[in-house]
Amino acid sequence: MPTHPHRQVAAHDQSVTHRYVMHYPAHAPREGDPHYRAFELYRRHHRQGAVCYVGERAGHDQCAGDLELHHSVLEFAVVNAVDAAALHKDFPEVREDATAEEIAQWAESSPGQFRWLCAYHHRGAGGAHTASHADWSAQLYVPHLIS
């Protein structure tokens, strides 16, 4: 690991707290979402042989809990407020003038929209819904980074 030849910071633990307010747009309950069926079909058809996305990279010894299906790009609660032109820049298959309905369909049924995560890497301290994006991404390659 390259360091300054005369200085090095020793390994250390540091508590990190992120606190902010999310401004969720109005949305129907998940159970009433007409696209939920596609999500459930994907879950059923791809569960066998699935492994945790993080554990597959940094080691399954840090995984805990059952596998859960995670939306890798957009969560259900925000799809109806997405700026289609902004989404199009990263996902050209989504038209710049796509409707909220079309974006929801894409988010619930397109390949690459889901990741299998163990409960810890989904909702725990090292979870996609808990850790900052920078920290969550780093743990893909640095085993036991978050506890």
Image (cartoon, rainbow, N blue to C red):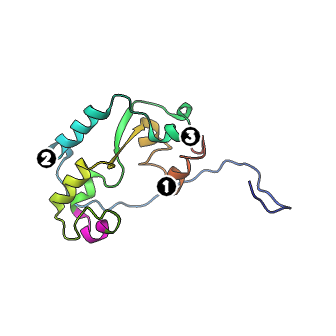
Residue 70, picture quadrant = top left
- Judged by depth in the image, the label closer to the viewer, 1 or 2, is 2
Q: Is residue 123 visible?
A: no
Coordinates of residue 48 in the picture (x, y in percent): 34, 28
Q: Is residue 104 left or right of residue 10?
A: left
Q: Is residue 107 visible?
A: yes
Identify the mark nearer the N-term, 1 or 2: 2
Q: Is residue 69 left or right of residue 118?
A: left
How far apart are labels 1 and 2 at the CA level? Answer: 30 Å
Outermost residue toward the top in this view: 48
Mark 3: secondary structure: helix
Q: Which residues are magenta?
A: 81-88
Residue at image position (42%, 42%) is 122
Q: Is residue 55 left or right of residue 36?
A: right
How far apart are labels 2 and 3 at the CA level? Answer: 36 Å
Q: Which residue is mark 2?
A: 34
Q: Between residues 68 and 53, which one lies in front from this camera angle?
A: 53
How far apart are labels 3 and 1 at the CA level? Answer: 18 Å
Q: Which residue is mark 1?
A: 132
**66 up-or-down from 83: above or below:** above
Q: Between residues 5 and 136, which one lies in front from this camera angle?
A: 5
Amino acid residing under circle 2: Pro
